Amino acid sequence: MSLITRFLGDPNQKYLKKTQSLVDQINQLEKELVALSDEKLKEKSTGLREKITVENLDENIPLAFALVREAAKRTLNQRHFDCQLQAGVALHQGEVIEMKTGEGKTLAATLPVYSNALLGKGVHVITVNDYLARRDAVWMGQIYYFLGLTVGVLNHEQSFLYNPQYHKAEAEKDKLRDELGSFKVVEDFLEPCSRREAYQADIAYGTNNEFGFDYLRDNMVVSLDQKVQRGFYYAVIDEADSILIDEARTPLIISQPQKESVRDYQFFAQLARRLRETSDYNADRKMGSVALTEEGISKAEKSLGVENLYHPENESYLHHLRQALKAKVLFLKDEAYVVKNGEVVIVDEFTGRLMPGRRYSEGLHQAIEAKEGVDIKPRSRTLATITLQNYFRMYQKLAGMTGTALSAAEEFDKVYHLDTKAIPTHKPMIRKDLPDKIFLDEESKFKAVIKQIKEFYKQGRPVLVGTTSIEKNEYLGKLLDREGISHQILNAKHHEEEGQIIAQAGRLGRLTIATNMAGRGVDIILGGNPVQSEEKEKVIKLEGLFILGTERHEARRIDNQLRGRSGRQGEPGAAQFYLSLKNELFPDAKNIIQWFGGERIEKLLSRFNFPKDEPIANRFVSQAIESAQRKIEGLNFDLRKRLLDYDDVMNKQRQIIYHKRDEIIALARGEKGEDLGKMVLKILEEEIRQIVGFHTPGQDPQGWNLEEIFEQFKTILLMSDDVHLQLRKIIQQSQPAVSREEIINYLMKLIEEDLKQKEEKHGRQNWLDLLKLIILRLLDDLWSQHLSSMDYLREAVGLRAYAQRDPLVEYQDEGYRMFQEFMLKWKSSAARTVLKVQIK
């Protein structure tokens, strides 16, 4: 306990005491609601919805929560515990809550989700995968439907509305309660609908990627009717640490292929194979970087036939070579990616789940494809991009829940301005967290792992083995096959069935091997699901599910997530990690010495003569590993924060562009009391003023070049020969007595007449629609080019640190200048294109 906590008290406990008064009010309303019929309860919900406002929402929370609790009892036969009510209050108030695995986060979330959905602004519930979005929408949808609310589901390329009458009769709903976890049963209650309809529902379930990409697509449309989202009022994020922290390291990008030669990638992949670590390049696996040595630079220059690899004209060569080396050294097959059906598919580092459709940017994915010898897909041109941090910060109110929030509390606060609260368990936690078993090498570790598994297998005790990569997952599977031990393998290659496999991991005699947190969000119930009471008793006598971790992760909370799969709801269980200090079986993969303590651990061990096959029971080694984990967590946080600092620059620009797009679309519909034609005239006047101003320097008209103004104007406005002659005559006669304003006014008069003729010829709305398409197309094309330029700028400013200049400040300053130039270029292009357009 810290000194501050000792004197001032635990702030978390103070918060829980404060929420207890709300819990008491909810409990007092229970007797009243129990006496109501189903119809009367629904009427109560309807009446609450009619009177609820943003201003009186908080004072109506007790009744709203009490209605949800009563509806849950009648539909799911589940009653919210007091600790779940406290969790609901915290979520409603925009906090991140830590609730241990199995404590009912999904049910607790229904309280604030229903309450805030009453306002009619739409509530978003974000989950970690499509299956959980469907499952939770159907499972919890019974509560919402009972209380008169609608529920939508957003999956990859699909969207649904929850409809209990869809396909199945009443008897099937009873089946749902027993078999929830089956894809077929869940989908029997989901009726396909449009994307827009799913968002129009009171509550929408989906993954972070679906919400984020829909936002980007909404800002690429040419009509407001094509937008699907309807604002960002309130979002509840399940597995908040995974979504808001782990997955937030990769921005969302919408792109299209661009023409380029694949031979360059193949050439540099071959060159990278010939270069040797230490002599030709140095790899920093912690920082994720590769740097060429002098010898490596000379070899590369010789192969490329250039004198100076670092000359600006050879920048693309250097970029290709760096990416090829990264692909070779830092991105390993079956760890960072898998090759499936001739394609390189990224593996999520934290969940072990495949991420089809996602590609590494800046040519890295192509470099990996060249390394693996599969078809190389051309690099893409970025059309739109946003980080998850900046997407979620758009919500007026944001909340999250996870089993491991406290260790990430600093990042939740600094990035999202969210406080973290720990919710007590309903029953005391009795899981045994055993000390790590540390071995000198990988071979000794796996022998011990197999020995321990065999002991439990004979007893019939269920075991869940956690690995950090697909490669080790399958290696362990082969070792078990040799021993004749039946097992279930759960990794990114079989993620379609992961919900069903993980849910049964608590059955008698069941052995499950899973990558990291595959199956996250699915409860493991002792005795299986549905619960077999006799089997459950036998498992409890064997002290419950045993979690066996085969490696430590970079982040302690991922280790804790694995531990948390056991010991749910006060049930028995145990967890232990088996570690090796040297990774001889997988020389390219991470090992503890490299990641968790370096030379410090090696020096420590050199003082003792440890037997190879015996675990090292030394608290200093375990402390060194945990200390290193904390340092790596801090390093990763700094890297994510730096990424966000850069994206904040882009975010301001993005908001301006998206606002401008919406303004253009609205003006084309005449929704703001004026139309797009007036906006176009303003842009044209700015362009004419710039041309006239440039060619009329100073106050003496003798120095003005009116002839050049005439030539410039000819290139802008397509005029008949008669108009050309008339304009030249006016210029010749008026020089030098004419003023700048007279020139501008005369040119604008010609422009206005030209635009008026086009509008009369084609009809006002047709003309406005055409203007909209022209201006939006130019804006989108130039924005895409600007995004690429900003990417190159970010790469370039990194080198300025060597000149004692802050790269971020340089990026901000030059990014602002480039954005100003981009806006000027867009206006100039729009002005010239609009005047030249000919409708046929």
Image (cartoon, grey):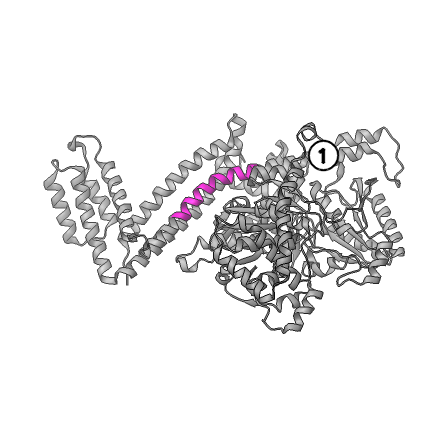
Which quarter of the picture shows residue 66? bottom right
Mark 1, secondary structure of its residue: helix
Dominant SS in magenta: helix
Q: Percent position (x, y) of residue 192?
A: 55, 67
Relative side of 738 to 639, left or right: left
Inspect the image, locate mark 1, and give the three-letter code of the amino acid beneath it.
Ala
Residue in the image at 18% along x and 32% along y: 703
Q: Is residue 281 magenta?
A: no
Q: Percent position (x, y) of residue 129?
A: 62, 56
Residue in the image at 80% along x and 46% along y: 430
Q: Percent position (x, y) of residue 349?
A: 66, 47
Which residue extends farthest left?
733
Q: Is residue 658 magenta?
A: yes
Relative side of 197 to 595, left or right: left
Front position in the image: 124 or 289: 124
Neighbours of disc 1 within 10 Å: few (<14), some (14-19), many (20+): some
Q: Which residues are magenta?
A: 641-659
Residue in the image at 48% along x and 36% along y: 312
Residue of label 1: 628
Q: Is residue 156 visible?
A: no
Quadrant (top left, top right, bottom left, bottom right) of the C terminus? bottom left
Front position in the image: 148 or 70: 70
Residue in the image at 73% along x and 33% along y: 627
Q: Percent position (x, y) of residue 116?
A: 53, 53
Front position in the image: 650 or 65: 65
